Image (cartoon, rainbow, N blue to C red):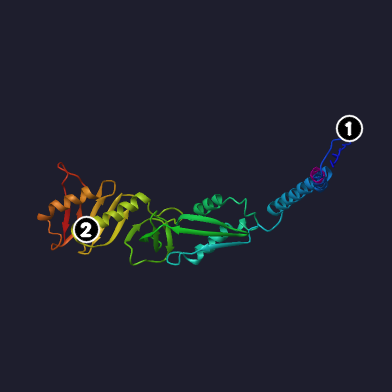
Amino acid sequence: MFRKKRKLRYKINYGHTPFSKNSGRKNSAATKLMKRRPSKAFGKVKKYFTLIIILFAIILAIYGIYFSEYFSIKEVFVEEDMENTSAIVTDEITQTIQEAVGENLIFIDTETLEYKILERFAGIEEVFIEKDYPHSLNISFSEFPLTANIVNESPTIKKTFVINSVGYAIKENAENPSLPYIKIRSDEPINTENPIIETGKLKYILETKIYFEDKFGMRIVSMEYKKVARELHLITENDFTIWLDIQQPAEEQLKKLKKALVKLDIYNEPFEYIDLRIAGGNGDKIIYKRR
């Protein structure tokens, strides 16, 4: 009537850890993972192979930069200002830096080339040289503005020049009717390697012309610069000349003439010259000659 209870017997293997079916699966997965991991030898090979590739790339880059002709300068381009720049100036600039052709574009010193151009060409105010990789130089520049015509008369020759704002002759045997005329008499023909007129003196002359025309409403036809005597003569449209001492401020000398207009009718009377150079006791002394 009564059922006997089953006795379960467990077999224990000493020295071994019992495990379930699930634990066996986990160990099996770990074993597979270990098999998938690369060996240390393979990691070292991969590391060395990567280093070799990097080293090869560095060597190739060094060769390309220092020894190959890929970055050598082959072309020089000059940007022209067609309004003021002549083809001769452009060609001369190109010839000036011709020695740079064949040099390495990466290591060429553009500032040195810019200085070389400025040193040679007095008419150039600014110059910029830009590297255009892989093998070109682009040059752009601006010139000093043209400011006056020079008429030089010497015992042997008469020549005309167009000078820039720093006094250098930019054009020879040429004139620009839109610019003021300055006459210079000399014993010898002018040396165009130096400024024909110093920058400060040229500025004085041009500003004096503008000041006179503005204050007196009379046009200056031309001017004469006497370098040795240090004088400036203004030739007016009424055909008389005003003498100024170029060592003294022009405004102070012309103010004397302004005060004297009640006595000297420069607009209607025929004068040959009016000398404002000499200062009297009160600083208002004027010497003049009527025709």
Q: Quadrant of residue 162?
A: bottom left
Residue 276 visible somewhere in the drawing: no
Query: Who is closer to the viewer here, 244 or 187?
Result: 244
- Left or right relative to 29: residue 147: left
Residue 43, percent across and down? 80, 45
Q: Which residues are magenta?
A: 22-26
Q: Would residue 23 be counted in the magenta stretch?
A: yes
Disc 2, SS:
helix
Badge 2 is on which residue?
214
Quadrant for the C terminus, please: bottom left
Q: Would residue 210 be counted in the magenta stretch?
A: no
- Left or right relative to 211: residue 13: right
Q: Amino acid at mark 1?
A: Gly
Query: Who is closer to the viewer here, 100 or 86?
Result: 100
Residue name at image x 75 percent, y 48 percent? 55
Crowding at mark 2 (Cα within 10 Å: few <14, some 14-19, many 20+) = few
Vertical relation: 156 (above or below) 35 = below
Residue name at image x 48 percent, y 58 percent? 141
Disc 1, SS:
loop
Give the main secondary structure, helix, strand or loop, of the magenta stretch.
helix
Residue 112, percent across and down? 55, 50
What residue occupies the far front of the structure in this picture?
A: 1
- Left or right relative to 269: residue 136: right
- The numbered mark at residue 15 is 1
Query: Who is closer to the viewer here, 211 or 153?
Result: 211
The mark closer to the camera, 1 or 2, is 1
Q: Amino acid at mark 2?
A: Asp
